[in-house]
Image (cartoon, rainbow, N blue to C red):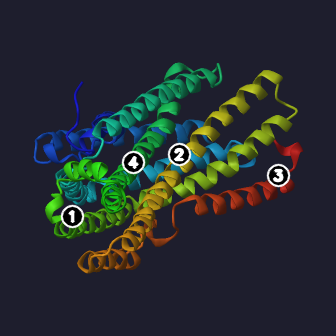
């Protein structure tokens, strides 16, 4: 089985789907100067233009003044949010393409540095995660598309059904792939921090464990026992530089994807509020037959699961990466207690000061900090807004 050389190569399945089904922007260093970028730009223009044409057709043929008093206005707003976010994300991706390539090159260098210290990143684990994400998306996208085409009114011909579904799903796919790429990049940062912590724990064990265990750790970390203190200082210095570089890269990745993340959080707030509200309306509407009521509720449940999973995935990746980054500080404190050499202690103090002065936060556009605290706050806001909508919406108008 093919094994990627670094975690960036492990993203290859996502990049392939990103190129084919998204908007074609190339963010992989190995082909950054290839002619494929030209064809990628052409493909992006064609797919974006086709999406715009379909959007105009849908708005012209299927949306009218009667929708303003109907629950279907939510669907109209949803389509507009997806479409607006898609165009913003496409422009943002092409503008920041060179910056993204530079970040990717630095990520490759960080993987090489960890490998040189004897703690290489698990590229196979990263590839497996990318494959699982790609396969899950393909299955979910096909199911949602086919189900959407089947669900629409029988008086709508097949071509119109396909246009409506494409208008909705293309915008969603573009936004989803950008969010998925961010999630995997941040998850890979967590894996790199784990390796930094693994190296620090090995050093800690050298100070505390028996001689046989020390010998095994010396061998794995390329530290010679006869001059261990000097090697510890050298390795700690390298680990400190790698740790700082990884923290900086986390901030730069968040800045590159900042606008996309803000739009995703706005979209998540809208969906997590309106989908349960739509389920409430569908279940209370006396004009719906039991079959229509069940189909609408099942459709809304599916979209609720997708929206909630996307929202949780982003915040989970950021929170776990931050937790792993903080764990470095805990290990450094333990190492400071165990170490007796003054030079090693000075290097540890520098490491501690660096961590203290460079806190890791994922703050897209500086508006909020992603993580479980943000999940708690947003769900609280969604619940409050949902209660207000249910209390103020007259049931006899839900047609």
Residue at 56 percent across and 49 percent down: it is 312
Q: Choose the circle earlier in sequence order: 3 or 2.
A: 2
Under tag 1, what secondary structure?
helix
Please name the residue that numbered disc 2 is placed on. Answer: 310
Q: For residue 93, which quarter of the picture?
A: bottom left
Residue at 67 percent across and 36 percent down: it is 300
Q: Choose the circle earlier in sequence order: 2 or 4.
A: 4
Q: Is residue 137 above or below residue 396?
A: above
Tag shown at residue 235: 1
Tag shown at residue 178: 4
Q: Choose the circle earlier in sequence order: 1 or 3.
A: 1
Please state the horizontal and vertical placement of residue 99, each as a whole percent of the image.
23, 60
Relative to the observer, which residue lies in front, 141 or 324? 324
Is residue 160 among what the camera can see?
no
Query: Number of callouts in the render?
Result: 4
Please state the horizontal and vertical placement of residue 377, each as a whole percent of the image.
65, 63
Tag shown at residue 51: none
Q: CA distance from mark 1 to mark 3?
A: 60 Å
Q: Choose the circle earlier in sequence order: 4 or 3.
A: 4
Residue at 61 percent across and 57 percent down: it is 375
Please name the residue that numbered disc 3 is placed on. Answer: 390
Tell me if mark 1 has few (under 14), some (14-19) or many (20+) residues whose alpha carbon lies within 10 angstroms of its own.
Answer: some
Q: Choose the circle earlier in sequence order: 2 or 1.
A: 1
Under tag 2, what secondary structure?
helix
Q: Is residue 393 above or below residue 139?
A: below
Tell me if mark 3 has few (under 14), some (14-19) or many (20+) residues whose alpha carbon lies within 10 angstroms of its own.
Answer: some
Is residue 358 among what the camera can see?
yes
Tell me if mark 2 has few (under 14), some (14-19) or many (20+) residues whose alpha carbon lies within 10 angstroms of its own.
Answer: some
Q: For residue 245, which quarter of the picture?
A: bottom left
């Amino acid at each position: 089985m093919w094994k990627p050389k670094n975690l960036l190569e492990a993203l290859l399945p996502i990049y392939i789907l990103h190129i084919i089904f998204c908007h074609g922007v190339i963010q992989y260093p190995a082909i950054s100067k290839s002619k494929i970028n030209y064809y990628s730009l052409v493909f992006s223009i064609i797919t974006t233009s086709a999406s715009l044409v379909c959007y105009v057709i849908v708005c012209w043929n299927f949306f009218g003044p009667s929708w303003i008093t109907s629950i279907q206005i939510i669907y109209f707003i949803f389509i507009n949010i997806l479409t607006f976010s898609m165009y913003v994300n496409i422009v943002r991706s092409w503008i920041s393409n060179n910056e993204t390539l530079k970040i990717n090159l630095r990520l490759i260098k960080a993987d090489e540095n960890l490998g040189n210290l004897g703690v290489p990143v698990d590229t196979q684990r990263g590839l497996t995660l990318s494959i699982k994400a790609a396969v899950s998306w393909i299955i979910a996208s096909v199911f949602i598309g086919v189900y959407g085409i089947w669900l629409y009114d029988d008086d709508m011909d097949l071509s119109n059904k396909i246009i409506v579904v494409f208008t909705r799903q293309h915008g969603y796919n573009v936004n989803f792939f950008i969010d998925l790429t961010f999630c995997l990049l941040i998850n890979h940062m967590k894996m790199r921090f784990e390796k930094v912590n693994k190296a620090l724990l090995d050093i800690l064990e050298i100070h505390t464990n028996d001689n046989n265990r020390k010998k095994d750790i010396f061998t794995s970390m390329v530290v010679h026992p006869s001059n261990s203190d000097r090697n510890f200082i050298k390795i700690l210095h390298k680990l400190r530089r790698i740790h700082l570089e990884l923290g900086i890269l986390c901030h730069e990745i968040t800045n590159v994807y900042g606008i996309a993340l803000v739009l995703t959080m706005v979209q998540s707030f809208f969906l997590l509020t309106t989908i349960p509200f739509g389920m409430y309306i569908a279940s209370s509407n006396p004009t719906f037959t039991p079959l229509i009521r069940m189909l609408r509720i099942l459709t809304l449940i599916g979209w609720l699961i997708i929206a909630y999973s996307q929202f949780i995935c982003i915040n989970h990746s950021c929170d776990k990466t931050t937790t792993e980054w903080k764990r470095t500080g805990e290990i450094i404190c333990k190492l400071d207690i165990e170490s007796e050499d003054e030079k090693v202690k000075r290097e540890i103090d520098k490491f501690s000061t660096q961590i203290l002065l460079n806190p890791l936060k994922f703050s897209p556009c500086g508006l909020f900090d992603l993580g479980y605290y943000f999940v708690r706050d947003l769900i609280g806001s969604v619940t409050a807004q949902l209660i207000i909508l249910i209390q103020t919406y007259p049931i006899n108008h839900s047609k």
